[in-house]
Amino acid sequence: MGENSFAHRKYTYFHDQKYPCEAIDIHHIEVQSNGAKGVFVSLLAAIVVGNALYLVLVKEKSVTLLFSSFLLWAFLRKLLLGKPVKKESVVIMPTLGVQLETLYLSGRIMRQFVPVSKILKPVLQECVTPVTCYWSLSLVMREEEELAPVFKVRLLMEIRKRNYVHH
Amino acid sequence: MMDGLIGDRERHRILMVSDFFYPNFGGVESHIYCLSQCLLKLGHKVVVMTHVYGNRSGVRYMTNGLKVYYIPWRPFLMQNTLPTIYGTLPIIRTILIRERITLVHGHSAFSTLCHEALIHARTMGYKVIFTDHSLYGFADVGSIHMNKVLQFTLADVSQAICVSHTSKENTVLRSGLPPEKVFVIPNAVDTAMFTPAPENPRSNDEIIIVVISRLVYRKGADLLVEVIPEVCRLYPHVRFVVGGDGPKRVRLEEMREKHFLQDRVEMLGAVPHSRVRSILVSGHIFLNSSLTEAFCIAILEAASCGLLTVSTRVGGVPEVLPDDMVVLAEPDPVDMVQAIKKAITILPTIDPQDMHKRVKKLYDWHDVARRTEIVYDRAMKCSNQNLLERLSRYLSCGSWAGKLFCLVMIIDFLLFHLLQLVQPAIDIEEVPNMVMSLGEGSTAGDDIPEQSSR
């Protein structure tokens, strides 16, 4: 991995300089998983399941209570932790297009390739959800209604913007 | 660009919150927009927060870089967001941190988003201002509950603004606020947009009376139904032009047919705001029959266009115009017909251009912004109180209500601290200051504002 990397809070940015920039340009952002959230979720699991076990064994309530408590815990876990992403990469090949890669904690890799003919412009966009608002680097594509999200950007101030769109 | 002083004055970063904003058109909406534009010109930073309108969701930019957050909470009743009390806490906190807001300014007692934002902003320690735009009753069940909610929200507000003295009296009585905390800053009108017709449209003897309002009970549509036939009977040379739509339109149409007034009463239907001026300048007299008004911008717009106004003497209406520009009447058909009679007799003495000049001197949005700035400066000087001191204010709201409000605020406080643990403030990136120079590629209000990082 290369020079030209820096860290900010739980995110680390690498710029791969193995290959010449003109041919292939690779950028990575890696996430350090938040220990506190994991501890919190485990604690919650202990409480929910413990409570259910107590009710079933001591108070002799029905066993379905135990199953429903597992379901509740699974739902809460999904809600709080979501899909844990380990690393996101962008491989830019000016003549061919852009490849977006996401590596999850479970080891799964998801790739998406966007041909250069489809890319109109990269944009820095503010995404507003019902609970939060964040910056995102996205690609505007021709003939598509939605944008292709590249990075959920938390390093806005530190990543220098470069224009990769060659018309 | 650092937050600092402009001359002797402090530069504020204001968040305007209301359920009512563009693309909706109305008094509150245009008030927020005009005030924000004038504050931007004075050098402050203004951000507006409102709920989603149709497809319009996310961040949009308006003239002069006014940033608007359309947060994706759907309106559920009369343009109001669903009141979940704590639901909007995360997004409000995020916006307050990323925009480095110093002051939160809420508009309209009818807006649930405004109430929630004010409560959460107080919990997070920001200074809070509330502007009340309407009068409200005391007697019916709806009013009683509304007033209780208002009492809760305003128990801990830093300063409040009302649009007329009558409105101040009404707000102070409804909410129990100390009167020293309430400032009166009347609305203004965009006199550049509402100009009279260049030449006098009094070529023939015909007199045209214009009515533009929502045809609902509150705006006195029932009074119109009584008044119009009587006036048409007494004065054969008078015509009516009625713009606006609403549930009472049916009654007006029936009145037209019953008295055979189809050629004397023209019904225009809903009028877009951009066409209001052209309809006003086609008339000589403006008729306002509202049953309640805190301040009536409509008669101000009419006066700015050079029309003589006939209005009901309700609420804050007598405070709006000088006595020679308006003829007031009780909200009673007989009295209103008398008032229209008086207006017709004094009509030849009216000079539209002169009237427009006088309104221009009396009302100016820049003046409103300067006065609002004084209120902001006062609010910033208010002391910071901790939770216990603030709770004592809520307890005084009532024997049961006080305890309930205290409980709500304690839970809010706890949720706020939980949120600080789960999503620390340092993880929320602050928005860089964007300087919009003239002639730069403008953002036309579509989905993707292109910005550059520094």
Image (tube, rainbow, N blue to C red):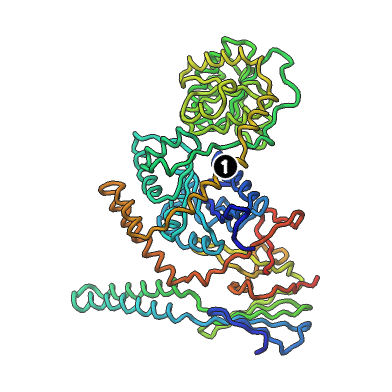
x, y percentage for residue B401? 29, 49
Q: Which residue shows up at 46% across the image and 63% down it? A: B90
**Could you tell me which residue is drawn at 41 percent across and 35 percent down?**
B169
Q: Considering only vertical position in the picture, is B195 above or below A137?
A: above
Q: In this rendered view, identify the residue nearer to me: B47 or B102.
A: B102
Of all residues, the one furthest to the left in this rendering is A59
The residue at the point 56 percent across, 55 percent down is B12
Q: In this orientation, does residue B298 appear?
A: yes
Work out which quarter of the rendered image holds the C terminus of chain A and state it: bottom right
Q: Is residue B120 above or below residue B111?
A: below
Question: Please, what is the three-letter code of the amino acid marked with disc 1?
Answer: His
Q: Write down the chain letter for disc 1.
A: B
Q: Position of residue A156 (x, y in %)?
A: 62, 72
Q: Which picture quadrant has residue B240? A: top right
Q: Going by the image, does B227 lie left or right of A23?
A: left
Q: Nearer the viewer, residue A130 or B377?
A: B377
Instruction: Please say if A120 is above or below B162.
Output: below
Quadrant for the N terminus of chain A in the image: bottom right
The vertical placement of A141 against B321, above or below, is: below
Mark 1 sits on what residue? Answer: B31
Compare residues B25 and B349 and report the one nearer the observer: B349
Residue A130 picture location, percent across and down: 50, 61
Q: Is residue B146 visible?
A: no
- Using the rendered view, name the quadrant where residue B200 is placed: top right
- Given the current orientation, which residue lies at the most extreme right position? A167
Left or right, A58 with respect to A164, comes to left
* Local secondary structure at mark 1: helix
Q: Within 10 Å of the Cα at label 1, are there few (<14), some (14-19), or many (20+) other Cα atoms? A: some
Picture coordinates of residue B446 (x, y %)? Answer: 67, 55
Q: Quadrant of residue A157?
A: bottom right
